[in-house]
Amino acid sequence: MEKLNYVIKEFNRLHGSEAQAKILEVKGDEVIIEFEGTFCKTCGLYDYFDDISWEALDFGIKIRPVEVLESEEDFERGRYVVKYKLER
């Protein structure tokens, strides 16, 4: 869990002007992460979700997004809750 917190911290450092991530729940091999922000309109939305996976590799964690559980969008902001699977 500590390494995963570092992953989120690094993601927020790199993407903080566009999106912030927060761990909502860790249960077994599943992690629920919330993303909020304005998100870059020229980038693919799912790139943000995949970036967590890339950041995690730097900390020796294999994690992949498997499902968007919630999504809320308005003109300038969005909120997404994404389920990830930890691979051991």
Image: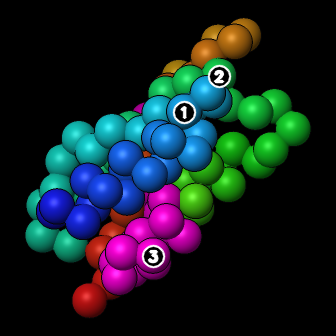
Residue at (48, 49) in percent of width and height: 11
Observer-nearest of 22 and 70? 22
Image coordinates of residue 79 in percent, x first then y, are 50, 27
User: Of label 2 and label 3, which has the lower sequence position?
Assistant: 2
Q: Which mark is residue 2?
A: none
Give the residue pinned by disc 1: 16
C-alpha separation, residue under disc 3 versus residue under disc 1:
19 Å
Q: Mark 2: few, some, or many residues within 10 Å (few <14, many ≥20)?
A: some
Residue at (62, 16) in percent of width and height: 77
C-alpha separation, residue under disc 2 versus residue under disc 1:
10 Å
User: Of label 2 and label 1, which has the lower sequence position?
Assistant: 1
> Relative to residue 57, is residue 47 drawn left or right?
right
Q: Residue furthest bottom?
A: 88
Residue at (37, 58) in percent of width and height: 7
Give the residue pinned by disc 3: 58
Q: Mark 3: few, some, or many residues within 10 Å (few <14, many ≥20)?
A: few
